[in-house]
Image (spheres, grey):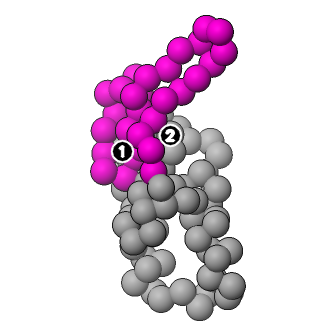
Amino acid sequence: MLSRVQHKNLVKFIGACMDPVMVIVTELLLGGTLRKYLLSLNMRPRCLDMHVVVGFALDIVRAMECLHSHRIIHRDLKPGWLLKRNKKEKLEQEN
């Protein structure tokens, strides 16, 4: 099912295997997590530029909308699971 889900704000699923151990392969994203990004700012989150905050929120909502349209529910959405492609680009949701 995940191989059919494609969206610019979702990590691309490449494949998986279960033998000898369970492994999920996705595209490589080098930007780190939203959590690490927020901690690296050394300031309170309310000090972020409103355009940045709204951009992150829209990226998250669009990714969740795509997952929900495929009848997939993400039950553990948190900053540690939200990935950035690189330091300048938008957020991606690890599904």
Residue at image point 48% right, 29% down: 25
Q: How far is mark 2 from mark 1, CA to CA? A: 11 Å
Picture coordinates of residue 10 (x, y %)?
40, 46
Picture coordinates of residue 60 (x, y %)?
45, 59
Q: Amino acid at mark 2?
A: Asn
- Disc tally is 2
The magenta stretch is 1-29
Q: Assess whether residue 6 is covered by the magenta stretch.
A: yes
Picture coordinates of residue 13 (x, y %)?
41, 32
Looking at marks 2 and 1 on the same chain, the residue that comes earlier in the sequence is marked by 1
Q: Which image quarter: residue 78?
A: bottom right
Q: Nearer the viewer, residue 83 or 7?
A: 83
In this view, 92 is above or below 16:
below
Q: Residue furthest top?
A: 19
Q: On residue 95, which mark appears?
A: 2
Q: Secondary structure at mark 2?
A: loop
Relative horizontal placement of residue 43, taking residue 48 as reference (left or right): right
Residue at image point 31% right, 45% down: 7
Q: Which image quarter: residue 36?
A: bottom right
Q: Quadrant of the N terminus?
A: top left
Residue at image point 49% right, 61% down: 31
Q: Which residue is mark 1?
A: 66
Can the viewer see residue 70 in this picture? no
Picture coordinates of residue 12 (x, y %)?
38, 38
Q: Nearer the viewer, residue 73 or 63?
A: 63
- Verify CB contact (< 8 Å) between mark 2 and mark 1: no
Q: Dot 1, crowdedness within 10 Å: few (<14), some or many (≥20)?
A: some
